[in-house]
C-alpha cells in the first residue's frame, strides 16, 4: 500500500499536498532550515514546510488519499 503523507507547500493558494513517499528519490532540508526539498524519482520536485524528520515520523500515520486504490 502506498505511503501518502500530507505536506504544506511554501507557495500557492492551496498549500496542502499529498506526497507518496514510495516515489521520493531524495529529501533534504534547505540551508536556511525553513523548507524541505522533495525530489521524486520521476524528476519532479516540491518544496514543503515540514522537516524530513516530521515526514518520516508521520509514515506510521500515513493517510490514505481520497480516491486512491490499493
Image (tube, rainbow, N blue to C red):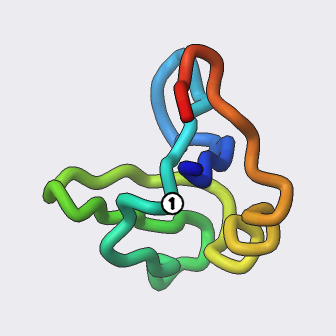
Secondary structure, mark 1, is helix
Q: Is residue 3 left or right of residue 25?
A: right
Position of residue 28 measured from the top left corner of the image (x, y, whole percent): 46, 80
* Residue, far front: 70
Q: Residue at x 56, y 37 (%)?
A: 18
Is the residue 67 above or below the residue 43 in the image?
Answer: above
Is the residue 10 above or below the residue 27 in the image?
Answer: above
Position of residue 6 measured from the top left corner of the image (x, y, whole percent): 67, 42
* Residue, far right: 61
Residue 65 image-quadrant placement: top right
**Around disc 1, counting alpha carbons within 10 Å, would you say few (fewer than 14), some (14 to 19), or many (20 or more)?**
some
Front residue of this view, candidates 33 and 9: 9
Q: Residue at x 28, y 54 (%)?
A: 45
Residue 51 image-quadrant placement: bottom right
Is the residue 61 above or below the residue 56 in the image?
Answer: above
Front residue of this view, candidates 56 and 9: 56
Q: How many marks?
A: 1
Q: Residue at x 31, y 64 (%)?
A: 39
* Residue, far left: 43
Quadrant in which the C terminus appears: top right
Is the residue 68 above or below the residue 25 in the image?
Answer: above
Name the residue tied to disc 1.
Answer: 21
Position of residue 13 measured from the top left corner of the image (x, y, whole percent): 53, 16
Q: Is residue 52 left or right of residue 27?
A: right
Amino acid at each position: 500500500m502506498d505511503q501518502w503523507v500530507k505536506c504544506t507547500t511554501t507557495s500557492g493558494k492551496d498549500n496542502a499536498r499529498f506526497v507518496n513517499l514510495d516515489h521520493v528519490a531524495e529529501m533534504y532540508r534547505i540551508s536556511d532550515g525553513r523548507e524541505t526539498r522533495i525530489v521524486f524519482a520521476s524528476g519532479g520536485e516540491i518544496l514543503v514546510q515540514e522537516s524530513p524528520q516530521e515526514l518520516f515520523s508521520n509514515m506510521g500515520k500515513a493517510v490514505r488519499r481520497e480516491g486512491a486504490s490499493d
